Amino acid sequence: MKPARFAYQRAATTEHVLEALHRSGGEARVIAGGQSLVPMLNMRLARPALLVDIMHVAALSHVDDDGARLIIGAGVRQRDLEMRHDTAARQPLLAMALPWLGHVQTRSRGTVCGSIAHADPSAELPLVLTALRGEVHLRSRRRARRLPAEAFFTGMMVTARAEDELIEAVSVPAVRPGTGYAFREISRRHGDFAIAAFAAVADEKELRLAIGGVAETPKARVLPTDQGLDDALDTFAWNLEARDDLHASARYRRELVRRIGREVVLAAIRDREARALKEAT
Amino acid sequence: MSRQAPAVLDAGQRHPVRFTLNGRKAGGEAEPRMLLHDFLRHVLGATGTHVGCEHGICGACTVQIDGAPARACLTLAVQADGAEIRTVEGLALAPDRLSALQEAFRAHHGLQCGFCTPGILMSLDALLRERPDCGEAEIRETLSGHLCRCTGYTPIVKAALAAAEALRVPHHA
Amino acid sequence: MTLDVHAQTVGEGGWVGISIPRVEDAALLAGRGRFIDDLGMPPGTLHAAILRSPHAHATIESIRTDAARAMPGVAAILTGTELRALTTSLVVGVKAPVECWPMAIDRVRYVGEPVAVAVATDRYLAEDALDAIEVSYAPLPAVVAPLDALRDGAPLLHEGFPGNIASDRSFSYGDPDGAFASAPHRIGVDVDYPRNACTPIETYGVVAEYDPALDAYDVLANFQGPFSIHAVIARALRVPGNRLRLRTPPDSGGSFGVKQGIFPYIVLIAVAARLAGRPVKWIEDRMEHLAGAVSATNRVTRLQAAVAEDGRILALDWDQIEDCGAHLRAPEPATLYRMHGNMTGAYAIRNLRIRNRVVVTNKLPTGLNRGFGGPQIYFPLERLISRIAATLGLDPLAVVRRNLVPADAFPYRTATGALLDSGDYRAALDVALRDGDHESLLARRAAARVEGRLYGIGYAAVVEPSVSNMGYITTVLTAAERRRAGPKNGAQATATITLDPVGSVSVHVASVPQGQGHRTVLSQVVADVFGLRPSDIRVVTELDTAKDAWSIASGNYASRFAPAVAGAAQIAATRLRERLARIAAAQLNARADELVFSAGKVFSPGNPGNAIPFTRLAATGHWAPATLPEEVEQSLRETVFWTPPQLDAPNDADEVNSSLCHGFIFDFCGVEVDRDTGEIRLDRYVTMHDCGRILHPGMVAGQITGGFAHALGAALLEEQSYAPDGSLLTGTLADYLIPTAREVPEPVILHYETPSPFTPLGAKGVGEGNTMSTPVCIANAVADALGLADIRLPLLPSRLSEALHGAEPQPPHHEARPPQATQGERTLFGRGRASVDATPEQLWAMLLDPALLARVVPGADNVRRESDTRFRAEVTLGIGPVRGRYRAEIALSDLDPPRAVTLSGSVDGALGFGRGRGRLRLVPVGQARTELTYDYEAAVGGKIASIGGRLLDGAARVVIGQFFESLAVQASGRRPSLWRRLLRLFRRRA
């Protein structure tokens, strides 16, 4: 299990990265933490001609908080975000999900944006980004654009990123008063990819549930809070077109959507009430 | 910051890689595709870091990169250029004097074949440094990034708890 | 803290029996272990990589290696042709005209079977060379499930195994017919025991060298024994045993039986070294290990019991169908016969019928794995006990008690011939219930059930055999065949004690440990004999067949170390001590038999002041041999060969004492099942062991916790899965799930010691028992929690969904129920339609035009027209970061111009293969439009199937989608607005 040959460039600026992507004609790939890419290199599933290392680009290595959003740069490691003192306060759902990503030994190297770029449908961060209506900030020499999560993830490990585009950052809305959050994941073992993962956001306007691990991309629905919830979850469960695999049947996944989906939205509502109480005092 | 694009390290060519290994300067040459564990073991001769799966699951190759436990098999040697690497060879206080963590593994039979052990020690060493007050749940959480087929983990957990205790009360040990 | 083991004080009864720190640990903890990949290699050593079959069953039409041979750094490429020229087939354990090669010759029979070996100056270059080898396969239908293999018309793996049956033997003991005829109840279970593998964290490693001058091979491998396999390897390499020097490294990273299965690779790498003319090293990687190392057997069993009203079992009827995978590799079908003496478990049952069939299927060949045959027996047997209790309304414990072998019956000869050496099973069970607080578990279950929670209790009682009789495997032969072949029996253990010129003691054994701490235990055993400290004893356990004492039974398997090897060392040390005592007696004017060896001195108990230092006495044989008493020939070295007399060859009635020692285990546990998720939480697990005399409590505990973790994996997580087409689905550790520290709780371990009368130290094996008792104990508890009669391992929450949640309601009327694929099914079905701005005639012309086809087939270039209806192309396909180059063939058939055509396509490449056919129909709509409808069926497999089946399915859908998308684009000359919807359709319908 040794990678095929590739060249390597350690970029110092975003421009270097964009230039390399521009010139490579789709044969270059960005390497950040490498925790998703290197296994594919070792298995020779991915065979890029050039790896552009972005971890020494200072401009990409921080989290910006503009009050309304957290903008997480491409070089921010998962563990750094997990360990930031204010992550839980600024975006609770992110803080809830981060400990579920792989293991501490992979979070220490893996980046937030790397997990988004990899677009595994059962990964936690694409789910959180979808649940929060986050955005992916793409930049190439041609243009800069932002795509909502649901437009970014187009299929299993397939995204709307063009080959010359760099994911410069992802952004998620910061915590808003009167909003509750909940996260839960069912996997065979802790640290495995999800059989089904759930992220719910409840505010005064709507109740939104996103589900990962079932369809080819994370999917979100706005659900009713009244007695129509069970029916809506049932429809959602069928909509996701779950498939059987080695670890779980489609039927089991639908059952999780109905049962755990319900639990998670109720948890988000309770969280909202608890936060409201805290805000009031 | 230079406007000049950094050099591309050609595929198929060897390039110098230098870092600090267990507090000492170390260096050699590696193709861009060479994995860090191969560089440590076969270029630098530091064979204490073992290789179990090369896809980031088993944890045998875990080393510390800039203080944090990480998979050497998911790291290219060229990525580690300039970093501070710590491996199992750097844990003992002296050639005939094991660290409190190593000693606890010995006292509690926390190893059998010893193949997964170096990686586990590197993760626990980082945990005990970062979270001296950690309890069993955190220890198991950290250990869940490692596979051990011999011990059933129970003796490892006991060893880690004993080491945490010994480090909190150094003279007690 | 220091490394000093001297700080330990010797116990009353000596060093044996106390948990001293292990002598192995200091080096292992400091990164100074000496595993095979850590050792220096001869200058110029080359590295091998192995190309493996992506197909479960296929004919190899051609292998093109010229491009690979021409690559820089490549020294040799080995294929089946060279292998056949230089070696002989591996021997097969049954009498049948079949061959068993370490690498495919002409035909592959499982995914992962070696097809070619590339040898280059480093591993990276060797893997590059694999990429350049082109193999052309003609796929054959595959058979995966053992019952399917037995069906009429099933694909045949070997001509020499008609009906895929390698062996079919029936046995009868006592009067089973009479017992079944007269019994009031007949109660049975049907079990489909899954495949799993013990997956040591260190993989296989081989370094081989060939000396043409001597026609001799020198091999270093982390092989674990039994060294009967040495004869198999030498025969395959066409050299006498003395021209095969087989050595083992000082450290080995776990084995659990698995490293027995390295031997075909020893042959392969040895031949590669011969071909390359240089030493060759191969370190197996994890994906190779999961696909191509060795697996435990899966087995289909129907077990019936004749049962009395009170739960007493009057007779058993076993029908076992053992699946050994694609080849019957030595020592198979040993998994099926290792337990032959123990088919009644811990119970006194005198009447048995057994039918044993061995089948071959298109899966990885099987071999040694911890528990070896035990899990496959005890799962049915202990499920049966549970079913008898449920059927007759009895307490499962009452059924167990009623049937246990009584304490006054030992040594007890079982109906099938095992001699159970010692035990008091009922007493051990009672102690377990008392000390394991069984009462509180019953209370917890009652309380949980009151709250509506799903809580269950399970039990298992098993006999754990150890020290295998080397003759048990011949039970697969008929008595007449055995007579012709000559008797096979015994279990030779060897140990050598050496005294050097300064009187220090070295021990050498042929035990080949993989982490069990043999060096420590031997230092304890020998220190006690000589009155020394363990740290005074140096123990060497690596083996060199050219220099060391060994026999076919040498090695580390069947839990033989403590009962056999440690005992042999004690005997050797005792013999040497007797000689030293005679020398000392002359000097001390005392009787030899009264001398005391203690604290490094030798003295008469009546005159302890007049003592000789042990070291001086021990050195005498070097410095002053002339002073030795006449009857002491030498006092430098003693080698002992020890084999237990109880291990006879199977007799004409097919009775066999398959193992020397029999430990007893009684387990019980409480589990809770989550009503919503089906997740299983092990609340409490109690395991009681009678493993005879305990030599090192810490290590015994470690063997139990380790075996327990393996068992927990087998119960809850691990299965080596194959799709119906033979694709391997568990090719990485992301899919073959091994328990971690979060999944494995601490078991409560209890002991009840009845020393074995048959072993020198009274010890029995202990390492394998929980793999036999724990899976079924947990399954019994889950069955109790859910009220299930049938239960299959591993206990996936998903599989419990039906029992937990009942039948699923129909989807809401506006939602179509998606097509249901069976578990792991690798065939994709799809259909779709599109509207294209072109006439049917225009579309038709495109399909027959290579230039246009090149634009339609995603990623294609170099499209060549082989005939009007056949095309070949090179295609590059990518999905996400996964990109590969493939050879594609496209054929058109059933042409009905311009209305319909069948398109068949196949792609083959390093990452896998795909084959599909689809019927395309063209219906004109108006003047210049065509309605295009299609349905397809595609099968995809190969390397990527074993890495990410999910990804593969997605990729296939996208590629097929791209094909039709491009067809529409080309036909209409513009990008159709419909294409996105079309793609969506593929995803939905496929």
Image (cartoon, coloured by chain):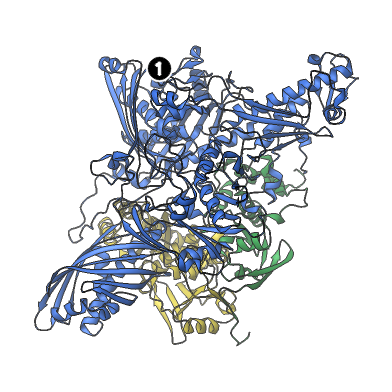
Given the current orientation, which residue lies at the most extreme front position?
Answer: C213
Please identify the quadrant where the N terminus of chain B is shown. bottom right
The color chain A is rendered in: yellow
Q: Is residue C318 left or right of residue C406?
A: left
Q: Could you classify mark 1 by the number of other residues whose Cα lies within 10 Å: few (under 14), some (14-19), or many (20 or more)?
A: some
In which image quadrant can residue C923 be found? bottom left
Is residue C630 in sight in this rendering? yes
SS at mark 1 in the image: helix
For mark 1, what is the residue? C402
Q: Is residue C128 left or right of residue C907?
A: right
Of residues C354 and A214, the one nearer the viewer is: C354
Give B6 or C799, whichever is nearer the viewer.
Answer: B6
- Type of the residue with mark 1: Arg
Q: What residue occupies the far top of the structure in this picture? A: C408
Residue A68, above or below C288: below
Taking C945 as reference, is C554 above or below it? above
Can the viewer see residue A189? no
Q: Chain coloured blue: which letter?
A: C
Q: Which chain is green?
A: B
Q: Is residue C380 above or below residue C796?
A: above
**Rendering coords of residue C532 (x, y %):** 78, 29
Determine which quarter of the picture holds residue A180. bottom left
Residue C205 lies, in percent from the top left, at 57, 50
Expressed as whole percent of the image width and height from the top left, the position of residue A177 reads 44, 68
Give the percent coordinates (x, y) of residue C977.
23, 80
Q: Judge left or right: residue A204 versus residue C70.
A: left
